[in-house]
Amino acid sequence: MAYCAVCRHRHTAHLLRRCKDLVAVASPGATRFLQAVAALLKQSLALRDRLQTGAVSPHGLAVATGRLEAAMDRLLTRPVRTPANRRLAQHLDHERPHLFSFLHCPGLHATNNVAERALRPAVCARKTWGGNRTDAGARAQQILASVLRTCRQQQQDPFPRLVALQRSPVAQCLDLAPTAHAP
């Protein structure tokens, strides 16, 4: 599953689909965890929609986002018995800092379908060329492709940003958040 290497934004639609698929084959007891995860994800999407319509203020967004994050934290600290649910819980725990990034950075999409489609040519090329030789090489290609495509969509010059990243002694966040005039 891919994500935006710039903001590590996870796609909510994939997580909801995974919950739905697991509910279809899970025992009644195991579905409670899955339904709780799906409910939190759906609440985050509803909050995003309320923000877009102006029905929630920035302060209200921050409070509601904090409540959603706290609820997810509580959910992920509970013991999970079934292996499939445990894998999902571990995945959510690993990606926890990025699950609601679209609420922290208005303008980000809750799904990364557009980004996945934009990066598809790079994925096809990688498969044609036989892939990457190392995990570090694959990660570098993933980040580079994401930065280049994001800069293109934001109509920004990627060169100075890539130079700054290369010269920086510490990790940096790029200033590539979506803007109102972006296509």
Image (tube, grey):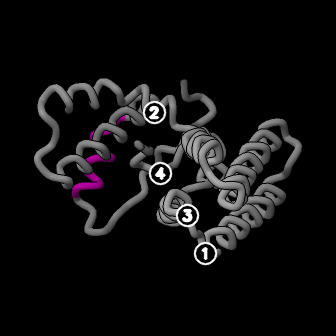
Q: Amino acid at mark 3?
A: Thr
Q: Which residue is mark 3?
A: 82
Q: Which residues are magenta?
A: 157-166
Indicate the quadrant where residue 146 lies: top left
- Secondary structure mostly seen in the magenta stretch: helix
The residue wearing badge 1 is: 79
From this viewpoint, is residue 97 visible? no
Q: Quadrant of the C terminus?
A: top right
- Mark toward the start of the polypeptide (3 vs 2): 3
Residue in the picture at 14% in, 52% down: 134
Q: Is label 2 in a helix, a strand or a loop?
A: helix
CA distance for labels 2 and 1: 34 Å
First-in-chain label (2 vs 1): 1
**7 within the magenta span:** no
Q: Which residue is mark 2?
A: 115
SS state under label 4: loop
N-term mark: 4 or 3: 4
Give neighbour class at mark 3: few <14, some 14-19, many 20+ (Cα, 10 Å). Answer: few
| Kind of residue at disc 1 | Pro
Q: Are the residues tagged 4 and 3 within 8 Å (C-beta)?
A: no
Numbered mark located on residue 7 in the image: 4
Q: Is residue 125 above or below residue 31?
A: above
Left or right of residue 128, residue 146 in this image: right
Q: Nearer the viewer, mark 4 or mark 3?
A: 3
x and y percentages locating residue 17 in the rendered image: 59, 40
Q: Is residue 47 visible?
A: yes
Tell me which numbered mark, 4 or 2, is placed earlier along the sequence.
4
Which dot, 2 or 1, sits closer to the camera? 1
Q: Amino acid at mark 2?
A: Ala
Q: CA distance from mark 4 to mark 2?
A: 12 Å
- State the CA–CA distance, disc 1 to disc 4: 29 Å
